[in-house]
């Protein structure tokens, strides 16, 4: 062994280059499982982090060109499998994994991405119930963001046709899967928001795989729905498919068909409500009319008024009208309340609402006694008024004056005569006394001396 | 009695009127007036519910970026097709 043979002396750069070449050829296309830590997302778009397990850690870098294909957000603490190639970062003499692809350990990246976005948007308040807008009672025009050739639009139109529903529909055609679909859906939602006549919107597509439905799990779509002025019904895939869009939407329809049903049933319910109101309107009015009629009848038969003569008839009728309304109102109103109670009881019979029924009964009782009391009071005061009128009419009656010894003189035409000079000797006249009447002829006329 | 503005307002007013009539404390003088208004509102609502016409349109993006509406051909209404 020649101790003096020249030793191989590397420069730092040389040996680093050798190590790098060695590592790169030996460890290309490897997958490493570990936990992400010390993650830094640089402004450039590159991701720097360490992968670690209990015993060791290694540096990793994921360049922007690769990082932008990650569906989920890389986060510290996330258990992942990173695939790529080992290399050496010469300036620091550090070896690192150049990451091509990261997938979460335990579940798919789409599933993780879904959970991450859901958590984030929920924390931001995008799913809050109080932010949800009510659907219009009677939509004039429905906007639909979906594929014009997909199953969803066919389903919706078929339902509306089957129900013979005439509605205005405006379709915003958007791709609903593949690259760029989410952006198209989002701009569709915004475009329809600029049209004044649209007052409800369906956003959706037919069934498909998780990947097919993915556009509805993207943040741009969620934000567009959240910002929509028009209420949005989401209708994505089948009943079992839940998307982020469903959580943000004002209403989730399990399928596109049921979205159409929802809009239609709303209208049917409205028709029924209006018909019901009209019915109640007619009944209430008829009821009030019959109340008035019955009041007149009852009071006409009342003995108290039998002696009131001639001119009192008008007042009597008026009184009849008023007080019969009340009197009859008592029994009819009570009957109505009782019928109402029966209805309620029947309706609530299915549930155990005894408490409510008891309360209703008490309310009925107190309403009835209040009604009774006010009716009594009204009748009394009205009768009093009629008696007073009767008395003053009696006082004014000419019969009362005759009783005091005065007489009334009339000419042959029946006109009351107040001046003697209107008579010629020989004219006939009649004199009305308190009891009976006398016919006579003028003998001598004497004018007043004043 | 003013003309109802829209379906929602008319329905709300109709409910109010029916409640008023049901309560029975309406004076005789306004009974007829209120009833007539109720009937008018009810007819208005029914007309609104029935009057909608069927129209299906699709938006198309024109070269200048604006959106244009054209009728959307429903497959089932195409001549020769069967449902």
Image (cartoon, coloured by chain):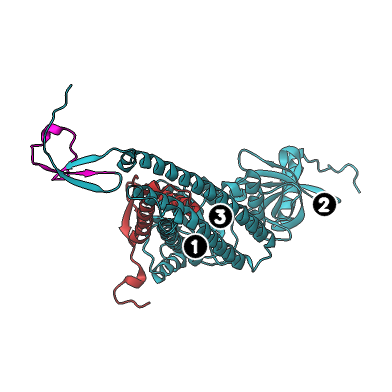
Residues marked 2 and 3, same chain: yes
C-alpha span from label 3 to label 1: 18 Å
Q: Position of residue A117 (x, y in %)?
A: 63, 51
Q: Secondary structure at mark 2?
A: loop
Q: Which chain is cyan?
A: A
Which mark is in front, 2 or 3?
3
Which segment did they paint magenta? A411-433
Residue at left 30%, top 44%? A434
Q: Are discs 1 and 2 both within one chain?
A: yes
Q: Residues under labels 2 and 3: Cα distance? A: 37 Å
Q: Looking at the picture, tell me which residue is in the foreground, A396 or A339.
A: A396
Above or below, comparing residue A5 to residue A419 in the picture: below
Residue at 19 percent of width and 34 percent of height? A418
Can the viewer see residue A444? yes
- Above or below, A172 relative to A92: below
- In which quadrant of the rendered image does the N terminus of chain B lie? top left
> Label 3: which residue?
A245
Q: What residue does disc 2 label?
A: A53
Q: Which residue is mark 1?
A: A262
Using a 10 Å C-alpha cutoff, classify the residue at mark 1 as few (fewer than 14 neighbours), some (14 to 19) or many (20 or more): some
Q: Is residue B6 above or below residue A242?
A: above
């Amino acid at each position: 062994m020649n101790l003096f043979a020249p030793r191989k002396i590397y420069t730092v750069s040389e040996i680093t280059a050798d190590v790098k070449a060695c590592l790169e050829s030996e460890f290309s296309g490897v997958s490493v499982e570990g936990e992400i830590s010390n993650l830094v997302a640089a402004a450039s778009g590159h991701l720097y982090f360490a992968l670690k397990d209990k015993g060791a850690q290694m540096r990793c870098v994921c360049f922007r060109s690769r990082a932008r294909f990650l569906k989920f957000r890389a986060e510290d603490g996330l258990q992942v499998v990173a695939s790529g190639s080992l290399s050496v970062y010469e300036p620091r003499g550090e070896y690192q994994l150049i990451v091509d692809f990261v997938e979460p350990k335990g579940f798919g990246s789409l599933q993780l991405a879904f959970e991450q976005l859901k958590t984030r948007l929920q924390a931001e308040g995008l799913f809050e119930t109080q932010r949800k807008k009510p659907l219009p009672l009677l939509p004039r025009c429905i906007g639909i963001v979906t594929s014009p050739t997909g199953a969803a639009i066919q389903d919706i139109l078929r339902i509306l046709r089957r129900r013979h529903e005439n509605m205005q529909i405006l379709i915003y055609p958007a791709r609903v899967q593949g690259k760029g679909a989410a952006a198209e859906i989002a701009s569709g939602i915004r475009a329809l928001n600029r049209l004044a006549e649209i007052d409800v919107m369906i956003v959706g597509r037919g069934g498909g795989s998780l990947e097919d439905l993915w556009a509805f799990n993207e943040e741009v779509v969620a934000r567009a729905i959240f910002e929509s002025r028009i209420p949005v019904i989401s209708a994505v895939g089948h009943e079992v498919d839940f998307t982020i869009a469903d959580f943000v939407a004002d209403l989730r329809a399990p399928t596109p068909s049921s979205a159409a049903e929802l809009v239609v049933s709303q209208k049917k319910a409205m028709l029924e409500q209006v018909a019901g109101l009209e019915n109640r309107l007619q009944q209430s009015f008829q009821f009030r009319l019959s109340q008035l009629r019955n009041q007149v009848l009852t009071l006409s038969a009342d003995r108290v008024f039998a002696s009131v003569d001639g001119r009192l008839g008008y007042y009597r009728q008026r009184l009849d009208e008023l007080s019969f309304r009340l009197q009859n109102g008592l029994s009819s109103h009570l009957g109505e309340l009782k019928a109402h109670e029966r209805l309620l009881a029947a309706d609530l019979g299915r549930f155990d609402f005894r408490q409510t029924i008891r309360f209703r009964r008490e309310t009925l009782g107190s309403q009835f006694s209040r009604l009774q009391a006010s009716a009594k009071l009204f009748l009394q005061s009205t009768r009093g008024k009629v008696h007073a009128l009767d008395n003053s009419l009696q006082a004014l009656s000419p019969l009362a004056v005759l009783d005091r010894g005065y007489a009334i003189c009339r000419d042959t035409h029946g006109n009351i005569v107040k001046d003697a000079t209107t008579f010629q000797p020989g004219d006939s006249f009649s004199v009305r006394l308190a009891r009976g009447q006398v016919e006579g002829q003028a003998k001598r006329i004497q004018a007043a001396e004043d | 009695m003013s003309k109802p503005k829209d379906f929602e307002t008319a329905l709300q007013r109709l409910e109010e009127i029916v409640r008023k009539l049901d309560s029975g404390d309406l004076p005789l003088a306004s009974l007829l007036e209120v009833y007539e208004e109720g009937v008018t509102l009810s007819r208005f609502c029914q007309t609104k519910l029935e009057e909608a016409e069927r129209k299906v349109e699709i938006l198309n993006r024109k070269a200048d970026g604006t959106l244009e509406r054209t009728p959307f051909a429903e497959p089932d209404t195409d001549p020769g097709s069967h449902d």
